[in-house]
Image: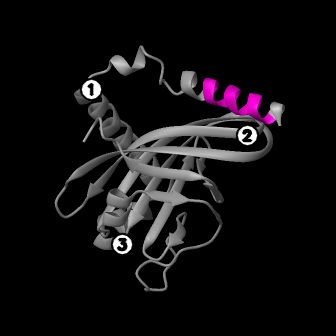
Amino acid sequence: MRHVQAAVTLVAALSTGLLGWAPAASAKSPDKERAEIRQMSEKVLTKLYSVEPGAKKVIEGSAGYAVFSNFGTKILVVGGGAGKGIAINRKTRAETFMKMVELQTGLGFGVKKFQLVWVFASQKALDEFVNSGWEFGGQATAAAQYQGEGAATQGALSVSPGVWLYQLTDDGLALELTVKGTKYYKDDDLN
């Protein structure tokens, strides 16, 4: 039990330092942080459209979308990560800045960086994500159907009715998605 507690403490310390949560990083102004998140979002979407051109049509036809960049570490039996992102209401163009945190269990070592693009077919799904947050405790590997048309939303995974998720890594689009123990919530400092 002591080893697990030590590993949790080590992962938390590494994640804090590696994720930029150190005091020097918190000196950024909210306007600067918002600008950086917007810029990250544009880069991630550009990357997504280059590896999966059909994603642009899916996003343009959606009620909204959210883009996150995540960085995590895993040491021994526990791991964790965090990220920031932005949710966009396509109808009103309203922006909601958000955070994400994750906790993983299982043997391993490593550092990972990936980006997530959530797509919401309905206003209700978008509102639930933005206003209630999201806790995702499963693993998904499936093809998705877009608005019941029978055409697969290539590269996206269906995580609930009317909600699709693209995961990008340095190698391109991930074909499997593992987002165990992940929570998404509003960033009170930036909204």
Using the image, determine if residue 80 lies above or below residue 50.
above
Q: In the rendered image, which residue does mark 3 sit on? A: 121
Of residues 141 and 22, which is closer to you in this image? 22
**Residue 30 placement: quadrant:** top left
Of residues 28 and 52, which is closer to you in this image? 28
Residue at x 55% of width, y 26% of height = 16
Q: Residue furthest left?
A: 92
* Three-letter residue code for mark 2: Val
Q: Earlier in the sequence, mark 2 or mark 1?
A: 1
The answer to whether residue 3 is left or right of residue 134 is right
Q: Is residue 159 at all visible to an observer of this figure?
A: yes
Label 3, secondary structure: give it.
Answer: loop
Q: Residue furthest top?
A: 24
* Three-letter residue code for mark 1: Lys
Label 1, secondary structure: give it.
Answer: helix
> Percent x, y for residue 89?
25, 59
Q: In the rendered image, which residue does mark 1 sit on? A: 32
The answer to whether residue 26 is left or right of residue 141 is left
Using the image, determine if residue 149 lies above or below residue 190.
below
Crowd band around label 3 with a 10 angstrom C-alpha radius: few (<14), some (14–19), many (20+): many
* Three-letter residue code for mark 3: Ala
Residue depth check, mark 2 versus mark 1: number of the one nearer the observer: 2
> Overall secondary structure of the magenta stretch?
helix
Residue at x 52% of width, y 65% of height = 156
Q: Quadrant of the N terminus?
A: top right
> Percent x, y for residue 180?
63, 55
Cα distance, mark 3 to mark 2?
34 Å
The answer to whether residue 13 is magenta is yes
Count of number-bearing discs: 3
Cα distance, mark 2 to mark 1?
33 Å
The magenta segment is 4-14
Q: In the rendered image, which residue does mark 2 sit on? A: 78
